[in-house]
Image (spheres, helix red, strand yellow):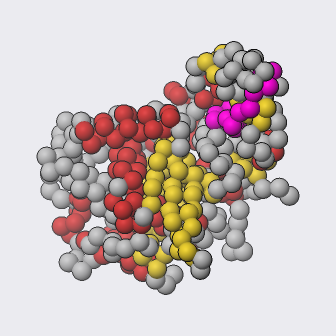
C-alpha cells in the first residue's frame, strides 16, 4: 500500500499522486496567461481570500506539471484538500507534525516562540542546523506576531484563539529543519518539514470543542503536552514567594487535561497515526510532557538536581541527561500530588518523557511584560530535540 502523506497545513492525508498543482499565472510559451482569482477551497478551508492562479490535477509524484488552460509549466504543488501550497520537496523529505497542547494560561504561545527562536539561533549553532519558515505566511507571522511581539516589545500574548472563534481552523506554523549528518561517505544534508499547531486551552474544556482538534491530533507524529505546575494544588504552595499564581476557575487541572487528551486518542483508536498501538497495547506516539515555569521552583531544588543545570553542550541530544531530568520530575510529582498523572502516562503510553523548562527564566511583570532581566530561557529545546532524536532527525548520545 502506497505511503500516505499528511498536509502540514490542514492535516488531511492523501497519496503522493493525488497532490494537485496551481498555475503560476505567468505568460506561457504559447502566449497565454491564466487569470488570478479567489480560490474558494483555499478561502473556506484556510481563510486565505487573495487572488491566486487556478488549481488543476496532474500526477503529484512529479515536481512540475503543465497547466491545461495556458499550457505553462508550474512548480506550485498544492494540497488536494485545502489547496495550500506545499513546502519544497514535500513528500521527498521527512514531514513531522507536532501538536502543542496545554491548558489555558500554561504559557503555550510564549513557550513556542522561545523554542523556535532558540532552535534558530543557539541550537542551530551547536548542531550545525537551520530552521527556516517553509512559506511566506509562516515567515511573516512568526517574525511579526510572535518574535517581535515578545523579543522586541517584551509583551506576553493574549490567549490563543479557540478553534470555534477561528472558523474551526488551527493555523499551523510550518518550518523546514535542515541538518548535516556525518556518514561513511562524508556529510549529507537531511531535511525535515516541521508543522506546529498551538491549540487553545479552552478547546479541551469540553468534548465538543476537543472534537474540532481531532484531525490535528490524529495526524500528529508527536505531542508536546505543556503542564503548568502552578495549576497543581500540591505545587502552588511550594512556588517562590511573590510568584503570580494563575487562576484555577474554569481551567482544567493538568491531570484532567492529560485524561481528556488520552481519552480522545483512545476513542479514536484505529483511525490515525496516534492510535497505532505497540505490543503492550499502549499509545505509541511519543509524548513530551513539559512542566513549564520551573523558575518558580528552583529555590526548593537540591543543588545537585539536574533541573538546576543546563543540558550538556554539543551537537547531539544527550539521552542520559534527559533521563536524569525525567526521573527528577517524576520525583517532584510525588510532592506536587501528581502521582495520578504519572500512573496514567505509565499505563497508557509506551513513549513519553518528562521535561522541566522555563521559557522566560523569570516571572513576568504584573502588566504581562517580560521581566527587566530579559528573556533567559532554560531547557526549552529539550522536548523538541528528544522528539527529533526519536525520529532519527538529530543524532543522540548516551544509553537509552
Q: Nearer the viewer, residue 380 or 312?
A: 312
In the image, 41 versus 61, the foreground residue is 61
137 left or right, relative to 81: left
State the residue at coordinates (24%, 63%). 297
Q: Position of residue 112 (x, y in %)?
A: 40, 48
In this view of the protein, can residue 72 be seen by the observer? Answer: yes
261 over 59 or under it: above or below: below
- For the point 38% across and 34% down, the residue is 145
Q: Nearer the viewer, residue 63 or 31?
A: 31
Count all numbered tags in the image, as a single digit: 0
Tell me if residue 41 can be seen: no
User: In the figure, residue 302 lies in which quadrant?
Assistant: bottom left
- Residues drawn in magenta: 69-85
Give residue 211's quadrant in the image. Answer: top right
Residue found at x 40% / y 56%: 119
Q: From the viewer's perspective, is 54 left or right of 150?
A: right
- Residue located 40% across and 51% down the image: 116
Residue 317 horizontal side relative to residue 220, left or right: left
Residue 252 percent across, percent down from the top left: 44, 47
Instruction: Say above or below: 320 vs 289.
Output: below
Magenta portion: prevailing SS class? loop
Amino acid at each position: 500500500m502506497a505511503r500516505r502523506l499528511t498536509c502540514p497545513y490542514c492535516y488531511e492525508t492523501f497519496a503522493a499522486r493525488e497532490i494537485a498543482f496551481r498555475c503560476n499565472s505567468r505568460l506561457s510559451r504559447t502566449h497565454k496567461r491564466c487569470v488570478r482569482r479567489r480560490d474558494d477551497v483555499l478561502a473556506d478551508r484556510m481563510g486565505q481570500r487573495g487572488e491566486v492562479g487556478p488549481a488543476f490535477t496532474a500526477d503529484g509524484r512529479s515536481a512540475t506539471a503543465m497547466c491545461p488552460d495556458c499550457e505553462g509549466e508550474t512548480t506550485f504543488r498544492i494540497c488536494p484538500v485545502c489547496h495550500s501550497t506545499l513546502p519544497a520537496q514535500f513528500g521527498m523529505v521527512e514531514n513531522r507534525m507536532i501538536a502543542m497542547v496545554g491548558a489555558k494560561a500554561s504559557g503555550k504561545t510564549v513557550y513556542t516562540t522561545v523554542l523556535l527562536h532558540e532552535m534558530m539561533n543557539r541550537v542551530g549553532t551547536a548542531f550545525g542546523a537551520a530552521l527556516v519558515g517553509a512559506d511566506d505566511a509562516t515567515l511573516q507571522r512568526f517574525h511579526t506576531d510572535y518574535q517581535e511581539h515578545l523579543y522586541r516589545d517584551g509583551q506576553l500574548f493574549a490567549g490563543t484563539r479557540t478553534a470555534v472563534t477561528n472558523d474551526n481552523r488551527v493555523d499551523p506554523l510550518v518550518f523546514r529543519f535542515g541538518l548535516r549528518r556525518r556518514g561513511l561517505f562524508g556529510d549529507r544534508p537531511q531535511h525535515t518539514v516541521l508543522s506546529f499547531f498551538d491549540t487553545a486551552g479552552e478547546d479541551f474544556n469540553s468534548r465538543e470543542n476537543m472534537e474540532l482538534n481531532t484531525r490535528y491530533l490524529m495526524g500528529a507524529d508527536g505531542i508536546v503536552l505543556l503542564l503548568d505546575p502552578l495549576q497543581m494544588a500540591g505545587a502552588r504552595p511550594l512556588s517562590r514567594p511573590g510568584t503570580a499564581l494563575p487562576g484555577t476557575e474554569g481551567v482544567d487541572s493538568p491531570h484532567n487535561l492529560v485524561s481528556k487528551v488520552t481519552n480522545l486518542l483512545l476513542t479514536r483508536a484505529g483511525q490515525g497515526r496516534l492510535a497505532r498501538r505497540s505490543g503492550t497495547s499502549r499509545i505509541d506516539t511519543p509524548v513530551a510532557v513539559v512542566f513549564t515555569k520551573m523558575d518558580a521552583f528552583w529555590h526548593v531544588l537540591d543543588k545537585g538536581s539536574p533541573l538546576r543545570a543546563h543540558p550538556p553542550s554539543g551537537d547531539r541530544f544527550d539521552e542520559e541527561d534527559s533521563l536524569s531530568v525525567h526521573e527528577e520530575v517524576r520525583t517532584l510529582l510525588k510532592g506536587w500530588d501528581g502521582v495520578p498523572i504519572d500512573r496514567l502516562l505509565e499505563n497508557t503510553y509506551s513513549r513519553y518523557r518528562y521535561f522541566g523548562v522555563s521559557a522566560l527564566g523569570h516571572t513576568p511583570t504584573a502588566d504581562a511584560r517580560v521581566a527587566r532581566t530579559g528573556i533567559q530561557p532554560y531547557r526549552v529545546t529539550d522536548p523538541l530535540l528528544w522528539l527529533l532524536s526519536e525520529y532519527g532527525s538529530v543524532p543522540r548520545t548516551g544509553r537509552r
